Amino acid sequence: MTTEKQIAVVTGSNRGLGYAISRKLAQIGVHVILTSRNQADGIAAKEQLASEGLIVDYHPLDVTNDASVQKLTAWLGETYGKVDILVNNAGINPTPDPEKSSLLTMELETIRSTFETNVLSVLRILQALIPLMKANNYGRIVNVSTEMASLAAIKTDYYPLSPAYRLSKVGVNALTVLLAKELQGDNILVNTYSPGWMKTDMGGENAPFTAEEGAETAVYLATLPDGSAQGQFFAEMRKFGGPIQLQW
Ligand SMILES: NC(=O)c1ccc[n+]([C@@H]2O[C@H](COP(=O)([O-])OP(=O)(O)OC[C@H]3O[C@@H](n4cnc5c(N)ncnc54)[C@H](OP(=O)(O)O)[C@@H]3O)[C@@H](O)[C@H]2O)c1
């Protein structure tokens, strides 16, 4: 199957921010590949979008699983022969458990498993899909981070300590900068952003923003023109009225 449309892969897009990003990309005419680790959840999300007239494709993806990433990559290569946009959204935050909220008492396994999903799995997917971007000399990569990973802000911000989560997202930011350096000269732009505190399963009901609002900056970064931002850390646009950069 060939398509003139841009092809976007969004990880963890059965609910929350990933679903909202998929929806917004589909609304502007991008051909979205919705992915989820639980097939039934992903198909239900696809059907929900279809009920709004938004036709997206679906493929299973557990970001922590090599074979799952390889299957998706092979399918994308055979079906479309390219990937234009990749949104690395899937993530976990073990913070609600108080034992896991102190560096002094938490199990190292909590940090290890959080890094597996939030950092190593991002790298796993980048290694798999960037060749499909390079083949087409085009790519836009959006890594979902958090302002909780701004080292400059940690001393004074009001967020929970969340050590495993913060350390992992600092890793995502570092990965973004290093990858940008490695991609110099390619028309593949990689950036990281904070969607703000959102009302999702992860963010909880007290959050000030919706997932739809948090998705706006992802769409902006996914559709950057050639030669624009590379290796930068963006804030949630709505809060500031436009794209601004966060301090690392
Ligand atoms: N919510 C906030 O306030 C907030 C703030 C800043 C940044 N973020 C970031 O935004 C992103 C999305 O968060 P959210 O609020 O939408 O969280 P969420 O509602 O908990 O959704 C997380 C998504 O990631 C998926 N996921 C987790 N592990 C996965 C795996 N191994 N393979 C594939 N998918 C996996 C989940 O799938 P299942 O349904 O199968 O679990 C789900 O679709 C995360 O990277 C998060 O760190 C969120």
Image (cartoon, rainbow, N blue to C red):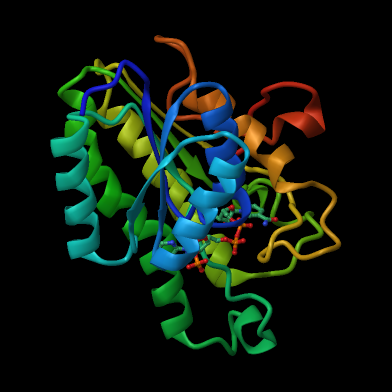
**Residue drawn at the location 74% of the way across and 52% of the way down:** 198
The picture quadrant where one finds residue 114 is bottom left
Q: Nearer the viewer, residue 245 or 17?
A: 17
Q: In the image, residue 74 lies at what x, y percent? A: 14, 46
Viewer-closest of 16 and 168:
16
Rendered image quadrant of residue 54: top right
At horizontal 33% and vertical 38% (from top left) the residue drawn is 178
Q: Is residue 193 left or right of residue 57?
A: right
Say which quarter of the image contains residue 184: top left
State the quadrant of the C terminus.
Answer: top right
29 in relation to 24, above or below: above
In the image, residue 154 above or below residue 53: below
Q: Position of residue 77 (x, y in %)?
A: 16, 37
Examine the rendering and report whether any part of residue 168 can be seen.
Answer: no
In the picture, measured across the screen, residue 224 lies left or right of residue 78, that is: right
Dividing the image into four quarters, tell me where ligand 1 lies.
bottom right
Task: Decide: is 153 above or below 185.
Answer: below
Q: Is residue 18 visible?
A: yes
Quadrant position of the N terminus in the picture? top left
| Left or right: where 14 falls relative to 201 | left
On the image, the x and y values in percent for residue 181 come to 31, 29
* Residue at x 73%, y 38% (from the top left corner): 213
- Residue for point 29% across, 19% down: 138
